[in-house]
Image (cartoon, helix red, strand yellow):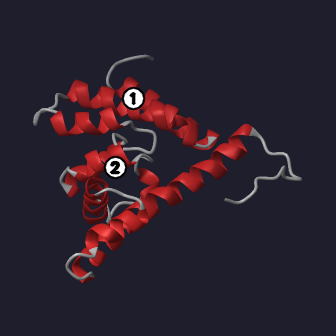
Amino acid sequence: MAEITRADTIRTGPEWATIIRDDLNRAVEGLISAGQHLTQAKADVNHGEWIPMLNGIGISQSHASHLMQIGRNLNQSDPTDLPRTVTALYELSQLDPEDIEHGVEDGTIHPDMTTQDAKNLKQEPEKTTAFEKAMKNLKALRKNADRLSFTERDEVIATAERIITELGGRK
């Protein structure tokens, strides 16, 4: 393991958060890639080599199976849009690719979502009311607000205020 040394440059909390978030995004990309490689390896290795290979890697058959499903079903997604835990990724990998795409677009699927959030997506009823959709979008906005620049936040606020006014709300 590499030794961690004190950097000459002092960074702020938000700067460190950006650096670490980038590290974690690469980790998600690595999990997807590992799943794809496991699928290829399973097709290539000789009979009787699969389990010893997994033991040599240090993962169980079930973990390999989960990674393989993640590699198959999340390979079209941008890793920066996905949660950072294997369990949440596995839960998402059980959704239809179209549902994953829509979830990323509407902010329901995001890097900070929990495994329980991902499980809940599988259990949501087919018909969601307009109110429920609007509330879900507001929750996603709140969770993602820290990743927006000040300009982007101002734009979101202005758009929200315009929509509220159009709907007959605040004047």
Q: Which residue is mark 2?
A: 89
Residue 148 vs 71, above or below: the answer is above
Image quarter where the N terminus lies is bottom right
Q: What residue sits 31% from the left and 64% below the top? A: 71
170 with respect to 2 (left or right): left
27 with respect to 110 (left or right): right
- Which secondary structure, mark 1? helix
Q: What residue sits 86% from the left and 51% below the top? A: 9
Residue lying farthest left? 126
Q: Neighbour class for label 1 at 10 Å: few (<14), some, many (≥20)?
A: some
46 with respect to 109 (left or right): left
Residue 137 horizontal/vertical position (percent): 35, 33
Residue 26 vs 166, above or below: the answer is below
Task: Kindly identify which numbered label has been placed on residue 139.
Answer: 1
Q: What residue sits 40% from the left and 34% below the top? A: 140
Numbered disc in front, either 2 or 1: 2
Q: Does residue 105 appear in the picture of this structure?
A: no
Residue 59 horizontal/vertical position (percent): 37, 58
